[in-house]
Amino acid sequence: EDQVTQSPEALRLQEGESSSLNCSYTVSGLRGLFWYRQDPGKGPEFLFTLYSAGEEKEKERLKATLTKKESFLHITAPKPEDSATYLCAVQARGGSEKLVFGKGMKLTVNP
Amino acid sequence: EPEVTQTPSHQVTQMGQEVILRCVPISNHLYFYWYRQILGQKVEFLVSFYNNEISEKSEIFDDQFSVERPDGSNFTLKIRSTKLEDSAMYFCASSERVWGSYNSPLHFGNGTRLTVT
């Protein structure tokens, strides 16, 4: 069964304090790994797709990386507006279209 | 930027009643999905829909659930006889296409919070 585990479950940072979020996955052949941001009361907002080990994507203060077993979301010099829950999801090869999500990581950035 | 819109934002219903959750996907998208998130739990896949038929469904999507694209813009999820455990946030999503090794990302709406009493 495909599984996604995110750690830590919650993280508090001071503004400007860089850190990384981890997403470990078990999947029967990775088709894609997705990072989403979710604000309270809102739907997941797409950030990145990663397809193969070694791939990296960047957007503003966020950088996502991928290995064969995990993905990291690096946050450089975060700002309070980066506070949100960050979701990781995988899609497996073999015809299934569903995304399997992790439980998410709640990030709070204090000014 | 185009977005997925869902109505209502909050629906309260009594156990055993039927509810219809509505979604307007992004206009050029071809694939449509429903996911749900029970409070404090993971976002879970319910069903995917393409070319006017269900392409995949999860174990959660039993006979009490149905989906429909009644016209060119709306996509609905019907729960025939709601149970307490159906209380959750229901998200509609759409994507342009899924082909080869390239995936168009899913774009989610802001959800309908369903409360069954």
Image: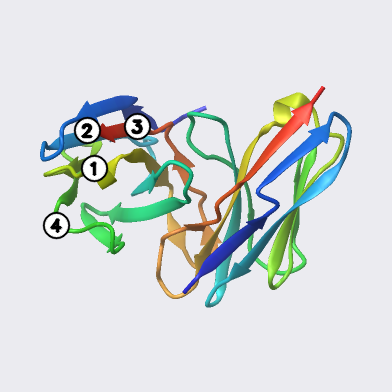
Q: Are marks 2 and 1 in contact (CB under 8 Å)?
A: yes
Q: Amino acid at mark 2?
A: Thr
Secondary element under disc 4, as helix, strand or loop, is loop
Q: Report the residue marked by disc 1.
A: B84
Residue B18 x/y as whole percent: 12, 37
Q: Is residue A40 above or below residue B81?
A: above
Residues behind callouts 1 and 3 on a single chain: yes
Mark 4 belongs to which subunit?
B
Frontmost residue, B15 versus A27: B15
Q: Amino acid at mark 1?
A: Leu
Q: Residue furthest top?
A: A111
Q: Amino acid at mark 4?
A: Asp
Q: Are marks 4 and 2 in contact (CB under 8 Å)?
A: no
Mark 3 burial class by Cα count in 10 Å: few <14, some 14-19, many 20+: many
Q: Can you tell which mark lies on residue B113?
A: 3
Cα–Cα span, label 1 and label 4? 16 Å
Using residue B34 as the reference point, say whether residue B3 is left or right of it.
right
Using residue A27 as the reference point, say whether residue A24 is left or right of it.
right
Q: Report the residue marked by disc 4.
A: B63
Closer mark to the observer between disc 1 and disc 4: 1
Closer mark to the observer between disc 1 and disc 3: 1
Using residue B80 as the reference point, say whether residue B59 is left or right of it.
right
Cα–Cα span, label 3 and label 2? 13 Å
Q: Is residue A38 above or below residue A102?
A: above
Mark 2 belongs to which subunit?
B
Quarter placement of the C terminus of chain B: top left
Mark 2 or mark 4, which is nearer the start of the sequence? 4
Mark 1 belongs to which subunit?
B
